[in-house]
Amino acid sequence: MRTISQVAELTGISTRTLQYYDEIGLLKPSELTQSGYRLYDDEALQKLQQILFFKELGFKLKEIKEILEKPDFDRMNAFKKQKELLLLKRNRTDRLIQLLSRLEKGEQCMSFKEFNLSDYIKALEDFKNNSTDDVIKYWGSVGNFDLFIQKIKDDEAEVAKLAIKQFGSVEKYTESMKYNLEHFSEIMKTQLPEAAKEIGKQSDILYGKLTADLSEDVSSHKIQSIIHEILQFIQKNSTDVSLNKPYVNVLIDTYSNDYIKSITDSKYEKGASDYIVKAFRYYSENNAPENN
């Protein structure tokens, strides 16, 4: 057991902060002495470590408390998600440092003002905070949605270029996205009729079959038959899709994306996304027709 002063010395967190965490129910001491002094065991310290990781990623104390109190909270899975988010954050920071190094050397670099997506990102954060049920329903978890937001931050310039190309300006894109987020539930109800929901279920079943045994050789007849079945299913339900090699490569790129990989691995099991990529790649190299 450690006293509150010892925990403060170990972690660098003030005793007043630890007292506040106790007051709001975020981190209760493991025991109280007869004199009323707080004591913390290793389990409490592990929880504190988890809290600090969430804080580092920008979570509010209220959000952290809600996450930790969920019955299905998985500490190891949370560590995995936090690591992924921190890696994305680090990559973005590394690129900013590289840009500053170029500027220090006197290189001429374009202005990034027109690529500022801060208003859109704020709208996403507000949506996460105010529509948690929808976030969990359509993204699987708040952690997945945070990966989605971080991915946008990480690729901000590219996303902004697409926004300008499709909408004319970042401002118009942001206005459109804000409207979609404000009316998200009704839009999803309109755009996801029962038939679409059924298609989603059938797709989940097929990918479930594909990832049921990740030790199965992707070149096996069984796996390649499932890949063929998936592609035929896509073609049947998407009349504008042609199942040629370029389209299969789109699927490979999709499941190689960090955000999609995180969702897929969370939905099935760790390594599922890489396995899907290998299976599609084998199909592309050995079975996919050049033309439909």
Image (cartoon, rainbow, N blue to C red):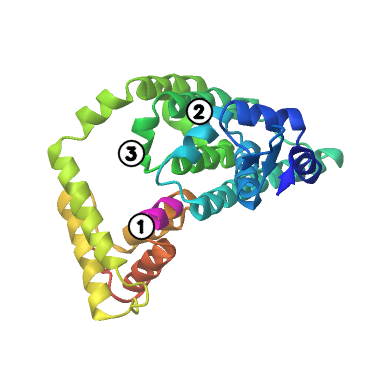
Image side of residue 97 versus residue 274, left or right:
right
Image: 169 above or below 139: above
Which residue position is annotated with label 1?
A: 251
Question: Magenta stretch: residue 266 in it?
Answer: yes
Position of 203 with respect to 4 (left or right) is left
Helix, strand, or loop for circle 2? Answer: helix
Decide if residue 245 is in sight here. Answer: yes
Label 1 neighbour load within 10 Å: few <14, some 14-19, many 20+ = some
Which disc is residue 125 wearing?
2
Task: Name the secondary structure under disc 3.
Answer: helix
Q: Secondary structure at mark 1?
A: helix
Q: Residue at x 23, y 77 (%)?
A: 222
204 or 26, nearer to the observer: 26
How far across and how far down the image is residue 262, in percent?
45, 52
The magenta stretch is 262-267
Query: Cα distance, mark 2 to mark 3?
Result: 15 Å
Q: Residue furthest front?
A: 34
Mark 3, residue position: 138
Residue 203 at x, y percent in the picture: 23, 54
